[in-house]
Image (cartoon, grey):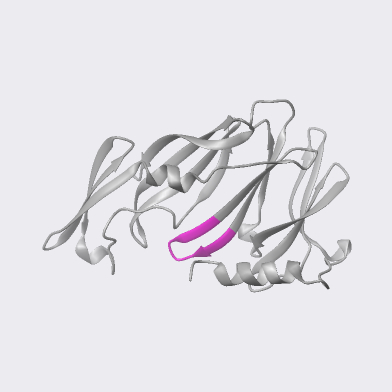
Amino acid sequence: MSMGFIPKLICAAIIALPSYLPVPNQEQTVLAEIKENQQDITLSATTKSVPGMYCGIAFTWNNRTKIFPWESISEPAFYPEVIITNIDDKGQDEAIIILTTGKGTGARGSAIHVLQEDWTEIPVGDPIVKAQNSLSSTYKDHEATVEYTVNIAGKEYVYSYPFEDAEMWFDEASIGRILRYRVQENKLIAEMPVQVSPGTYTGTIEVEYREYNGELLPSEVSYIEDL
């Protein structure tokens, strides 16, 4: 069963209950705030934590509030991030909400939502498919070492590790177990570390988004090696 699958089922069941009611405003946990540049934004958990997750998040933007069926890990270190920027280079600024939806050893799940002030959500494409299509690798098991030849976006990289450095080595370099997002210079970027074992990383594939026909779609792929 995939990371976070059980909490997701519990969250969906809670929000779908006919008797579901958010906790009162005074009891809501504030997860993120922006109060600057004529913007007043607050993200709050509308339910009490269940199995380490908040289910249902209230988004207040300049005195207007809407509740979304979003999920977020309830540990403060993994609270959501909110950024205000003109991510699509059109009209007014959007609110970008980055949520952590799962975590574990060598694993992290993230979700992203891009809202306009009228609550319209801009669709965001899946970066993992784009990155996977740019990644290939071969694996060689030597007597005392393992070797990976990794091809990313047409460039080849070779990595060698002592066999004893990990209890388990993957048959190929892989991505998707860890997904993070960031906003840099008004651009949305997805980060996916390339793993060859649960705790061994060769570097990070980054996918930059571009706006196309009202959607944010994965576009340019780049790779940053771990030093």
Q: How many marks?
A: 0
Position of 186 with respect to 179 (left or right) is right
Vertical position of residue 192 compared to residue 90: above or below: below
Q: Residue at x 66, y 65 (%)?
A: 74
Position of 155 with respect to 83 (left or right) is left
Vertical position of residue 76 compared to residue 157: above or below: below
Image quarter (top left, top right, bottom left or bottom right) of the C terminus? top left
Vertical position of residue 99 compared to residue 155: above or below: below
Q: Residue at x 82, y 33 (%)?
A: 38
Front-lying residue, 92 or 27:
92
Name the spot of residue 76 as percent of width and height, x first: 65, 61
Q: Residue at x 79, y 49 (%)?
A: 42
Name the spot of residue 36 as percent of width and height, x first: 78, 37
Q: Tell me which secondary structure the magenta stretch mostly adopts.
A: strand
Front-lying residue, 79 or 140:
140
Name the spot of residue 199 as percent of width and height, x first: 36, 61
Q: Which residues are magenta?
A: 101-109
Task: Answer with the quarter of the image where residue 84 lies.
Answer: top right
Position of 133 with respect to 69 (left or right) is left
Q: Residue at x 74, y 68 (%)?
A: 16
Q: Residue furthest left?
A: 143
Vertical position of residue 37 compared to residue 110: above or below: above
Q: Is residue 105 magenta?
A: yes
Name the spot of residue 161 as percent of width and height, x first: 22, 56
Task: Answer with the quarter of the image where residue 79 lies.
Answer: bottom right
Q: Is residue 62 magenta?
A: no
Position of 132 with respect to 181 (left or right) is left
